[in-house]
Structures are given as C-alpha cells and as structure tokens.
Amino acid sequence: MKSIKEEANLVNKKLLLRLDLNVPIVNNKITDTTRIDKILPTLEFLINQNTRIIIISHVGRPKGKIVNELSLKLICEELSKKLNQNVKLFSKNIKEIDSKELFNNDERVIMLENIRFYPEEEENNEKFAKHLSTLADIYVNDAFSCSHRAHTSIHKITNFLPSFSGLQLDLEVNALKKITSEIKKPITCIIGGSKVSTKINIIKNLMPKFDNIIIVGGMANNIIKYMGNNIGRSLQEENSEEIIKEIFSLSEKVNCKIIYPEDILVGKNLKGESTIKQLNEIATDEMILDIGPKTTDNIINIIDKSSTILWNGPAGYYENPNFAIGSIKIAKKIIENNKSNVIYSVAGGGDTVSLINSLNAVNDFNFVSTAGGAFLEYLEGKELPGIKALN
C-alpha cells in the first residue's frame, strides 16, 4: 500500500479523494464533526501540493435513490468553514459529468453529491468505476471506515487509476498494526457490547496475541449467568453458553487471562440510582448496569501493568452518570498512563468514541478510531476489500 505522501509529482493533478463524511445530522445541523476534523490534515496536505481535489463521500443509506435529506450540502458548508475556502457541491448527475466542467480557474476543492444516490456504488460496478476514473488522474482512499465494503468508490475504482492511501487511513492502519502485529507486551483488551456472538471472532483472533481480555458491559452479564448467578432483568444473549465455554477453553490453551466483573452496580431501571452488589446478590427485578468498585480497581491495576491497551465498548450504561463511573475511571487511567508515555492506547467503536468525546479526551489517546465495522473486521483478522485493492 503506497501513501499519497510518497507520491512526488502532485502539482496540478486532479485527485479523486474518497472520504467518509457520514456525520450525524439532526434538524438540519451536524451534531458531531469528528469525522470531518480527522480528514482535514489530508485535505490541507493536498491543497498545499497545489492539486485539484474531487471529494467523493456519502451520508446515510439512500439505497441508490436521491434522498434530499441526505444531500452533502451541509457537509460542504462545514468543510468550507474549516478549510477557510470555498468547497463547491457539484450536484449534477455523476454519470453525466465531463471532467472539463468540474473546476473553475480558482477552484481547488469540489464535492460530488452523495455517491450512494447511485445503485452502481454498492454494486461495485465496473462501468461506473471506469466513468469515475475519467474525472481525475489519481485516486486516494482516506475512508478506512468504509474500507470493509466492496463498493465502486472503494474497491473497483483502483483498477482504473494509480491508487494511494490517505493520511488518515495510514494512521488508522498503523495504529491497528501496533495492537495486532507489532505489539508491545503486556497487552490488554477491554471489550464490551451487548452480544458475545458479535465479538467472539475478535476475541478468538486476539486471544493468542494478548495477555488479558477484560469483558465488560452486556457481554459480561452472560458470563456472570454462566457462572451460576441470577442476573435479574439484565441484558443477556440467549444460548451463549457454548460460546462462553469456547472462550474459557481457548484462554487456557493460549495462556490469556479472561477477566470479568467480580462486583457490579445494579438499578431497577435505566434512569435510576445505582447500588453496589456482589454477583450472588442480584435480585430478580434488578439490572446490571455498570462494574463495581472492586472490578474497577482490578482493571486499573491491569492497565498499570500493561504496555498496550485496546478498548472497544464501555463498561456500563454510561448515558446515566450513575452507571458511567467504571467507564470514566478506565478512561482516566488510560489517559494518565498515556500522558506518562508508559502505554500505547487505541480505542474504537461508536459508544466508546461517544464516551471519550464526552470527556473531551480524543487527543489523550494514541488513536481513537471512528470506524465501526471496518475497525471490528480488521480486529477479527479479516482482509478488508478497500485495503486489499490498495495493496
């Protein structure tokens, strides 16, 4: 995979730049600009190289139809402000665009309308890719979070243009390499989520390489139940016993410790108060909604003994401050060790990123990934179509 930073001759070249600007929009306002902020260094680098940039991106899932609410107009306006220069939305049907009509003399950055307005995008259509390639001299993928999709503007396009990775994609892949192949041990994974079945392949892939796997959140409820405890009205996954058995069996074979809660915080409902309970004290009308103080102290102790940390999934129902205590203490300990340069930290997954954002701590981790599916599939050991195409 060759980075666009390595390409010597970029002056006056037209670049087709695939970004993931799929930001949340509520009441015609962007509510989180993290994905826009992360790609600014790539855009600034390319502008300084005196290139002409054609941005391809998407918002939402229009399923190959024009949906006005999913236009990239708002994103164009936000990008114009952040770059301090005009970014024009070129809303003409992409299949009818001629490259000669794209730029006026002084324009440096334009954006094509939502690429998912076209059914050919998700079909990985060769004809559509060939037409897109006529618009530019070079293709750059800076959308790691879309790279698990074999879509035209991620995969097929690389057959028709010299293709490079962008700065943000480089950062993402290098951060993930440091926790999957270039590991500094001891290494610990803190993993949450509601279902063990959705994370089992990640756990199985990481376990032979990791020293500790700490299971928290809804996933841990299944283990607590498996160990013979009543979990009341807690979130649980049916028929997960065989998966849990498999996890513990593999952990013994590869000498990786599995850590799960030894005490918890419970509540009668999601908006309620919290009560500390031991695992054998949970009442039938209670829900496990956070890890308890003993468990938190144990996790902090493990973080202190680790050189590398991967965090995917909060420890509890962090939307209620009464059940955010465990997650916040984990975050603060990682941040503290990060600032002392005694740990390399990578965090990812929507809820984890939201929690870190709420603490205004994105820059206090070595890397925070906004990629959901691509982040998880990479951790599973899967080959991502977008990365394979660049290779």
Image: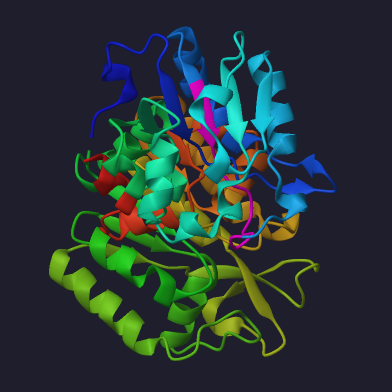
- Camera-nearest residue between 205 and 264: 205
- Camera-nearest residue between 34 and 15: 15
Residue 375 in sight here: no
Q: Residue at x 52, y 32 (%)?
A: 98
Q: Is residue 48 left or right of residue 170?
A: right
Q: Residue furthest left?
A: 253
| Secondary structure mostly seen in the magenta stretch | loop
Task: Tell me the quarter of the image containing the C terminus.
Answer: top left
Kindly indicate the quadrant of the structure image that contains residue 118.
bottom right
Image height of 157 relative to 262, above or below: above
Q: Residue 359 placed where, x, y %?
A: 65, 38
Image height of 75 relative to 270, above or below: above
Kindly indicate the quadrant of the structure image that contains residue 283.
bottom right
Q: Residue at x 55, y 82 (%)?
A: 236
Q: Residue at x 54, y 84 (%)?
A: 280
Residue 255 magenta-highlighted: no
Q: Residue 15 placed where, x, y %?
A: 43, 25
Q: Is residue 258 left or right of residue 121?
A: left
Which stretch appears magenta? Answer: 53-64
- Camera-nearest residue between 356 and 298: 356
Image height of 374 relative to 347, above or below: below
